[in-house]
């Protein structure tokens, strides 16, 4: 068993292949965090002393300690794991330990700690899902109203864990904005509370529900603890160092504008916060995350399939879509080796700009007089799969859908509803909205040979109110408190629609997008197969975006495009080779206007695509190593991928800040078999130990210099 107890069922030990997580339970219902780190012996687990600091009447009489669960209302002032009240006015409860149970489901073993209030009206279960093979643990909680008055949930987080004093800890997280996502932030944890969150109704470009804590680790050495919240709505993460040196980390559903009401026999389960730790630095941390995503999180149907080289028509045609133009682009895309052709925005309704058509998911007859089938047939004849862009959670005011159902959007009565990108957000918590979208997308799927959806969301939620139309006016239909559940209802509705599509059409590949990286998390990745990393397609800007993204997410899921030069965003002119090398570090897509590419560029593109097809299994399925960062002193961004069997490796080298003239750069590789002999680019031969300890030399002499190196094991 990977879960067992000590000390008369008072100490719980959760073991994975390499790590252990230990906490104590008190009769009072308090869960004290004891240890999280390298796997130890049973005797060692028994010997660990609970770390408690006696203090004053200003702190709890138990003393100051680290917790695994914090109820609200006591002499503990960190963020609560649970805050509830009921209709009689009770605002706090004595949660007493009742029992525990261990069960198994799929690849995980589950420990559930059961706590009840003194009158046994409400049951709280703290869940620990242990994935032994992957060194990961899932944290969540379920609250049930058995027989009590209506229970109001005001905060219900999935994760609470603490780190002991006497060490200096560093906090890593990802920040950014639209076209500047996944910027890695690393800072010392000092006294006070640091919060990152989203209140936008989605994961957001500005922060990501991933974190890491380390005690002095570097890229390849040292202890790193990390976590992913698997949820696509409002979330928060709090990292607090108290006056006594404890570091408390809590996270899950954001309690901003949060409310859930539980009547008798109703329950609420929080989404899962997945956590893990590694003693092999940030590389070890990322590799645990990447493997867990590949083997557990991603939809099973495409989990082990390499991603095809994709062409997307957006930057070539924007809204000026027509059957003839798309066929011409498809022929050019097939000529350079693309394997999937995706028609982006503009194919439906009266969609001639971003001012109209969203919500009317029917083919525009003026643009496609014979429908989509002639285009799809031609794409198939060219040896490519066909995909299409959709934005199902949105509606334009100028649309048939909005004219028929103006109450289907989030809005406040008596207040002007904000438009962004000329669109409103549909209330995806409404069953009728979900059914309309399901029916619309089913008609597309049932009537056409569609293999791919690019699912977009191009604005955040505002005016979060639930209304119905009466006499031409929007009128609220429920209390302000109950309306706060719309945030969770939207995410649940989104998941229901995606789950339905994945179940009915298992061969359908779905890419999640929200103006680029606005909705990327393990919740949406359980239902989609890849993500659009950023609307920023500039090859130079993409280096830090993709580098930061690699800390949390697998390269296979990260879509990277080659687009035109100069780039639309910043007018930077970059050689085609550099653009390809930047994009080949994930799943490759082409997004440029092939109508304007000269023949020599299309010939060069075909060569790079051919090379990518040779190496993509290593890139998409292999083990990733960050060799040199975009802001490194070497002025080189270098990413290495090693096949699982260590037979081959691919190394990308891209100039990222050369100054003061040419210079030599030496980079030490990772992950090779030290005893084996490898050949570098069919030329130099040396042992894996040589390449890892001596390294490779690269003479950096000009801006936008880049190269792809291949190492293959030889007998």
Image: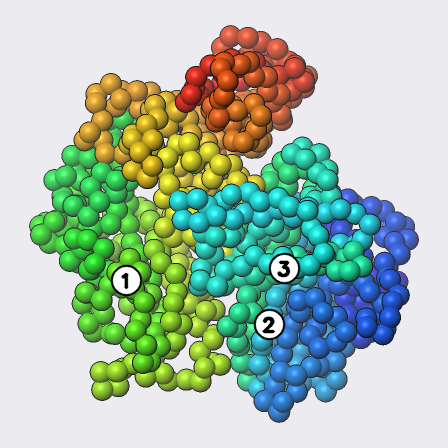
- Dot 3: what SS? strand
The mark that comes first in sequence, 1 or 2, is: 2
**Callouts 3 and 1 close, C-beta under 8 Å:** no
Q: Is residue 529 visible?
A: no
Relative to 125, say whether 91 is above or below. below
**Residue at the bottom extreme of this rendering:** 88
Location of residue 5 (image quadrant): bottom right
Q: Position of residue 83 (x, y in %)?
A: 64, 75
Q: Is residue 109 left or right of residue 583?
A: right
- Dot 2: what SS? strand
- Dot 1: what SS? strand
How many numbered marks have been drawn onto this rendered protein structure?
3
Location of residue 50 (image quadrant): bottom right
The residue at the point 50 percent across, 60 percent down is 198
Q: Which mark is residue 659?
A: none
Q: Is residue 67 left or right of residue 412?
A: right
Crowd tier of the residue under label 1, counting other residues whose Cα lies within 10 Å: few below 14, some 14–19, many 20 or above? many
> Which residue was labeled with disc 2?
155
Q: From mark 2 to mark 3, how far is it between C-alphas?
A: 13 Å
Q: Is residue 123 visible?
A: yes
The residue at the point 16 percent across, 45 percent down is 320
Q: From mark 1 to mark 2, how far is it between C-alphas?
A: 31 Å
Q: Nearer the viewer, mark 2 or mark 3?
A: 3
Q: Nearer the viewer, residue 366 or 125?
A: 366
The residue at the point 76 percent across, 51 percent down is 36
Q: Is residue 588 left or right of residue 652?
A: left
The mark that comes first in sequence, 3 or 1, is: 3
Q: From mark 3 to mark 1, how far is it between C-alphas?
A: 33 Å
């Amino acid at each position: 068993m990977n879960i067992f107890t000590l000390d008369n069922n008072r100490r719980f030990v959760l073991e994975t292949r390499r790590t252990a997580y230990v906490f104590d339970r008190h009769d009072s219902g308090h869960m004290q965090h004891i240890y999280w780190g390298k796997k130890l012996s049973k005797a060692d687990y028994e010997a660990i002393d609970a770390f408690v600091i006696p203090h004053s009447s200003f702190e709890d009489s138990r003393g100051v300690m680290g917790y695994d669960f914090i109820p609200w209302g006591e002499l503990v002032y960190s963020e609560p794991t649970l805050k509830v009240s009921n209709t009689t006015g009770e605002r706090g409860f004595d949660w007493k330990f009742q029992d525990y149970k261990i069960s198994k489901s799929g690849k995980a073993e589950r420990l559930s700690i059961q706590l009840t209030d003194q009158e046994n009206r409400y049951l709280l279960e703290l869940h620990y899902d242990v994935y032994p093979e992957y060194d990961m643990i899932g944290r969540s909680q379920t609250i049930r109203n058995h027989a009590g008055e209506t229970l109001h949930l005001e905060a219900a987080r999935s994760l609470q864990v603490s780190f002991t004093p006497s060490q200096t800890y560093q906090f890593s997280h990802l920040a950014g904005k639209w076209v500047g996502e996944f910027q890695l932030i690393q800072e010392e944890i000092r006294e006070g509370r640091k919060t990152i969150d989203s209140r936008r109704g989605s994961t957001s470009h500005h922060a990501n529900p991933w974190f890491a804590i380390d005690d002095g680790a570097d890229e390849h050495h040292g202890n790193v603890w990390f976590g992913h919240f698997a949820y696509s709505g409002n979330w928060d993460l709090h990292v607090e160092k108290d006056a006594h040196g404890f570091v408390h980390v809590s996270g899950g559903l954001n309690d901003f504008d949060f409310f859930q009401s539980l009547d008798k026999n109703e329950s609420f389960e929080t989404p899962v916060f997945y956590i893990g730790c590694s003693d092999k630095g940030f590389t070890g941390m990322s590799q645990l995350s990447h493997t867990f995503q590949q083997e557990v999180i991603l939809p099973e149907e495409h989990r082990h399939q390499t991603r095809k080289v994709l062409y997307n028509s957006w930057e070539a045609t924007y809204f000026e879509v027509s059957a003839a133009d798309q066929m011409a682009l498809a022929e050019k895309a097939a000529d350079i080796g693309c394997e999937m052709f995706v028609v982006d925005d503009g194919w439906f309704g009266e969609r001639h700009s971003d001012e109209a058509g969203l919500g009317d998911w029917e083919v525009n007859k003026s643009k496609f007089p014979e429908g989509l089938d002639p285009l799809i047939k031609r794409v198939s004849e060219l040896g490519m799969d066909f995909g299409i862009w959709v934005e199902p959670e949105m509606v334009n005011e100028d649309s048939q859908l909005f004219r028929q159902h103006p109450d289907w959007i989030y809005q406040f009565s008596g207040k002007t509803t904000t438009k962004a990108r000329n669109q409103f957000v549909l209330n995806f918590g409404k069953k009728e909205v979900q059914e309309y979208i399901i029916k619309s997308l089913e008609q597309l799927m049932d009537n056409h040979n569609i293999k791919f959806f690019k699912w977009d969301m191009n604005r955040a939620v505002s005016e979060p109110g639930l209304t119905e139309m009466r006499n031409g006016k929007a009128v609220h239909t429920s209390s302000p408190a109950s309306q706060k559940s719309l945030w969770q209802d939207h995410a649940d509705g989104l998941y229901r629609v995606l789950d339905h599509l994945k179940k009915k059409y298992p061969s359908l590949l779905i890419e999640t997008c929200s103006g680029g990286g606005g909705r990327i998390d393990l919740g949406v990745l359980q239902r989609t197969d890849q993500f659009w990393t950023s609307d920023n397609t500039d090859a130079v800007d993409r280096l830090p975006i993709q580098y930061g993204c690699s800390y949390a997410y697998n390269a296979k899921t990260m879509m990277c495009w080659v687009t035109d030069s100069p780039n639309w965003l910043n007018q930077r002119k970059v050689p085609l080779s550099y653009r390809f090398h930047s994009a080949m570090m994930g799943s490759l897509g082409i997004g440029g206007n092939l109508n304007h590419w000269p023949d020599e560029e299309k010939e060069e593109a075909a060569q790079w695509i051919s090379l990518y097809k040779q190496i993509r299994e290593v890139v998409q399925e292999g083990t990733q190593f960050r060799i040199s960062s975009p802001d490194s002193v070497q002025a080189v961004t270098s990413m290495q991928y090693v096949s699982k069997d260590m037979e081959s490796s691919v190394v990308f080298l891209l100039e990222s800040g050369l100054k003061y003239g040419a210079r030599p750069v030496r980079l030490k590789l990772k992950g090779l078999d030290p005893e084996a002999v490898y050949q570098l680019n069919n030329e130099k031969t040396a042992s894996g130990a040589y390449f890892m300890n001596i390294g490779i030399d690269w003479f950096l002499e000009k801006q936008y210099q880049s190269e792809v190196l291949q190492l293959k094991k030889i007998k």
